[in-house]
Amino acid sequence: MKKFINKVDDVLVESLSGFAAAHSDIVSLNLAPNFLTRKQKASNKVAVISGGGSGHEPLHAGYIGYGMLDAACPGHVFTSPTPDQMLAAAEAVHANKGVLFIVKNYAGDVMNFEMAAEMLPFESATVLTSDDCAVINSTYTTGRRGVAGTVIVEKCVGSLAETGADLQSCKQLGDKINHRTASMGVALTSCTVPAAGRPTFDISDRELEMGVGIHGEPGRRRDQMREADAIIQELVSAILDNLKPAPDSEALLLINGFGATPLMELYLIYNSAANLFKQHGIRIARSLVGNYTTALDMAGASVTLCLLDDEIKQHWDSPVHTAALRWGM
């Protein structure tokens, strides 16, 4: 294993410290327990908090700031944060209108956020993201996994919270977006968790993992490497089968890299996916291409489609200022 590491046990704290220093105008870092918050605490709004295992950067710390999250709780690599992290973060950013947790559907994340919610001295609600339509059966989740669609939920719910909307309105929007979003990923290589020191799974240069998870979980099947258009056709077909969009639907298309896929290839994937969706009568009205929900050093990508309506489009377009997303300010 070759990585830029001093000591494996120090990777998370050193990385968080670097992130907070690099973006000191946006975020503040708390250690023991680990959580990050906005530099300037927002007032009189629903506090939007997310979190999960590290290794998916910029998810979630990269989305703290105006128009998105108020706080994020990073666990160790691919490991859920603990309830005390979530409780401390909620108490730090609570602004008298309740707390909304945005949680990816993994067993550890769900359990720990539920425990934290039960301990809070103020009202809370949860949006559970579950956009991964690759999942048929999984030991990591109860049902479908939350993957790159989580970014869309965080962006739009964060926008609504900035308007002063109440807790239930924010939850309802998050649930609606999750219901209208589907993702499917493919990996060309495994990722290497620093503590393990070796790839999570073995795969040859002639193979790919179709439907892989963002922690290196096995996909739908191991298959032979082939041309990009054929790979993307399978991803797009799975999404269309899941969402069953009406003809002439408007959509947001997110092409997400897993950490080791060049942008040149991600834009090639966008071109292929957009053309396929258009052939099925989908109008791509908004788009995003890049590394937004990664899996350490995995080579691969996911395709996410979110079916838009006027409300979702309004909150996607609204101003945002975070380390990883910035527009309209």
Image: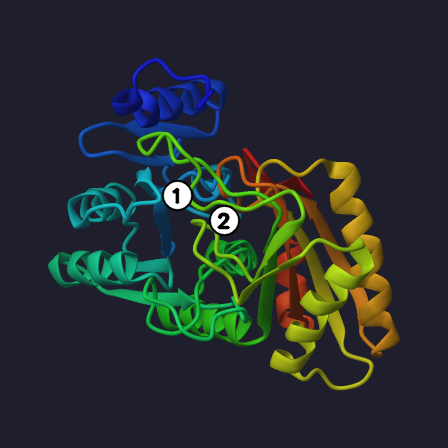
Which element carries disc 1, helix, strand or loop?
A: loop
Residue 98 appears in the picture as rendered: no
Mark 2: few/some/many CA within 10 Å (<14, 14-19, 20+): many
Give the residue type at disc 1.
Ala
Give the distance between the C-alpha atoms of the residues marked 2 and 1, in whole angstroms.
11 Å
Mark 1: few/some/many CA within 10 Å (<14, 14-19, 20+): some
- Residue 133 location, x and y as percent? 54, 71
Going 43% across and 72% down the picture, which residue do you hit?
Answer: 169
- Residue 15 location, x and y as percent? 39, 23
- Residue 10 location, x and y as percent? 28, 21
As rendered, which of 222 and 9 lies closer to the eye?
222
Up the image or down, 232 lies above or below 82; here it is below
Q: Are marks 2 and 1 in contact (CB under 8 Å)?
A: no
Q: Which mark is residue 72?
A: none
Going 30% across and 50% down the picture, which residue do you hit?
Answer: 95
- Residue 48 location, x and y as percent? 38, 53
Q: Is residue 63 left or right of residue 268?
A: left
Q: Is residue 8 left or right of residue 247?
A: left
Which element carries disc 2, helix, strand or loop?
A: loop
Where is the N terminus found, in terms of image quarters? top left
Up the image or down, 111 lies above or below 319; here it is below
Give the residue pinned by disc 1.
Answer: 42
Going from N to C along the chain, the mark reached first, 2 or 1, is: 1
Going 39% across and 74% down the picture, which residue do you hit?
Answer: 143
Going 38% across and 68% down the picture, which residue do you hit?
Answer: 138
Q: Is residue 132 left or right of residue 46?
A: right
Residue 243: quarter of image: bottom right
Give the residue pinned by disc 2.
Answer: 68
Q: Is residue 218 left or right of residue 267?
A: left
How many numbered circles are shown? 2
